[in-house]
Image: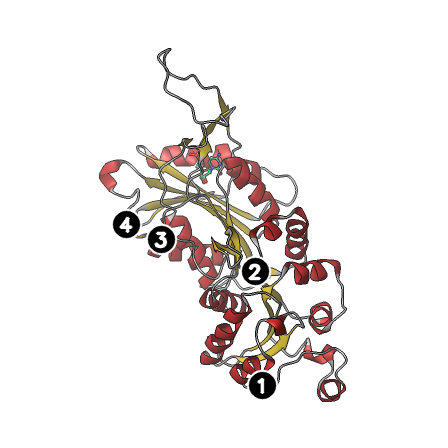
Amino acid sequence: MLSGKHILLIIGGGIAAFKSLDLIRRLRERGVTVTPVLTRAGEEFVTPLSVSALAGRKVYRDLFDLTDEAEMGHIQLSRVADLVVVAPATADLMAKMAQGLANDLASTLLLATDTPVMIAPAMNVRMWQHAATQRNLATLRGDGVHVIGPNDGDMACGEFGPGRMAEPLEIVAAIEARLSDGPLKGRRVLVTSGPTHEPIDPVRYIANRSSGAQGTAIARALAELGAQVVFITGPATVPPPEGVEVVRVETAAEMLAAVEAALPADVAVFAAAVADWRVSQASQKKLKKSKDGLPKFDFAENPDILKQVARMTEGRPPLVIGFAAETDDVINHATAKRDRKGCDWIVANDVSPATGIMGGSENAVVVIDESGAETWPRMSKVAVARALAERIARALGASV
Ligand code: C5P
C-alpha cells in the first residue's frame, strides 16, 4: 500500500529519536523512500551515520550547506515527498511550526513545503500539558497538520502521562491511512467512543457501561478507508485504534470541549455512552461513611454533545450520526431520538441483557435516516463498523 511513496522524515531532538530509526526501517520494509533530515538537537540523540545507513540515503542537516544546495535546494527538498513526517516533534519544533519560524533546515522545510505534514509529538508530560504547547497544537491542527500521539506512559524523565511518542508501527498505520487512496481520503471524521466518568469524589464516579469496542471499530474502519480520524474517547476497556489521532477524556464536559476543538469535520460519529448526569459539586476529599445516614447529592445535567453539534447553526458537520442503545421498541424510540437530537442518522441497537451485545463482540443494528429504518443482520462489531464506514463513504459521494 505504501510501496513507491516518498517520505521526508524530520527527526527532532528528543530521547524518542531512537524510535525514528526503527520507523525508517519499518517504512523501508514497506517500499517507502525515506529522505531524512536531522536537526542539530536530533544529532545529540542519534548519529547522522546511523540515520543515513538505515535510510540508505544522504541525511540533510544544514540550511546553508553549499553542496546540498547545489544538489537539491531546500525548497525543492521540501516538496519531493508525498508526506512530511516530524518524529519526534519536540515542543520547540511545534512552537516554531506554529509561529512560522524558519531559522534552521527543518523549520525552513516545514514552512516551504506544499505537501501534507504529520507530527508525532514527544516531550515531558508537563511540557505537553503546558498552555503554550496546547495553544501551538490547536494552531497546527487548524493549519491542517495531522497529529499522531503522544501516548500515555512512563517517560524517560521518570514522570508518567501523555508525552511518549507514538510507536513506529502506529506512525506507519497513520501514514498508511493518510496516504491511502481510499474513498474517504481527504475527509476529516470525528468519532466519540467509550463511557464518560463523572466524579463523585476522588475515588467514586458515575458511568454507563461501555467497552468502547464499537466506537473503536468504527474509527479503525473509517481510517482504513483513508479518512483522517480524530478519536475522542472516555476511559474505555479496549485500546484505541492505530492510525488515528486519539484524544483521551474523562468527563462529558471534557468530551464536549474536545469535540469542539476537533471541529470542523466532514462527519461526526457519536458512539460514546455519555453519562446523562453528574454530581454538581464533586467532593475534593473521599466521602466517609457516616452514622447520620446516606450522603445526599445534587445532580446536574451533562451537555448533550450529539444534540449540541447536530443543532449547530454554523460549522455543523454535513453528516452527524448518533447512536441509540435501547432495550425495547427499538425502531420507534430511535426514530424519536433522531428527531429530538437533530442528527442525520441514528444507529440503534437492542442492548437488553438477553442479546449479549453489551460488552460482546457482535451487534445487531438498525440504521435510521430521513428515508426510514434499515435493519442489518446480526454480525461482528467489526463488520458493523465496516458497513457503516462504507455507508458513510457512499453518503459523501464515493462509489464503495
Ligand atoms: O440520549 P441518549 O444518550 O440515549 O443518546 C444517545 C446518543 O447521544 C449517542 O450517540 C451518544 O453518543 C449521544 N450523547 C451525547 N451526549 C450526551 C448523551 C448522549 O453525545 N450527553
Which numbered disc covers residue 154?
A: none
Q: Earlier in the sequence, mark 2 or mark 4?
A: 2
Check contact, mark 1 vs mark 4: CB within 8 A. no
Given the image, on which type of amino acid does mark 3 rest?
Val
Residue at image point 39% right, 58% down: 386
Please state the horizontal and vertical placement of residue 372, each as a whole percent of the image: 41, 42
Q: Which residue is mark 1?
A: 57
Please state the horizontal and vertical placement of residue 171, each as a whole percent of the image: 50, 66
Given the image, on which type of amino acid does mark 2 rest?
Ala
> With respect to residue 235, does 380 lie above or below?
below
Residue at image point 53% right, 32% down: 303
Q: Which residue is mark 3?
A: 384
> With respect to residue 13, does 358 lie above or below?
above
Which numbered disc covers residue 122?
A: 2
Foreground disc of the pair 2, 1: 2
Given the image, on which type of amino acid does mark 1 rest?
Arg
Q: CA distance from mark 2 to mark 1?
A: 25 Å
Q: Which residue is mark 4?
A: 378
How many numbered dots are placed on residues in this image? 4
Residue at image point 42% right, 36% down: 335
Foreground disc of the pair 1, 3: 1
Local packing at callout 2 (Cα closer than 10 Å; few below 14, some 14-19, many 20+) is many
**Disc 2: residue Cβ within 8 A of ligand 1's nearest atom:** no
Foreground disc of the pair 1, 4: 1
Q: Secondary structure at mark 2?
A: loop
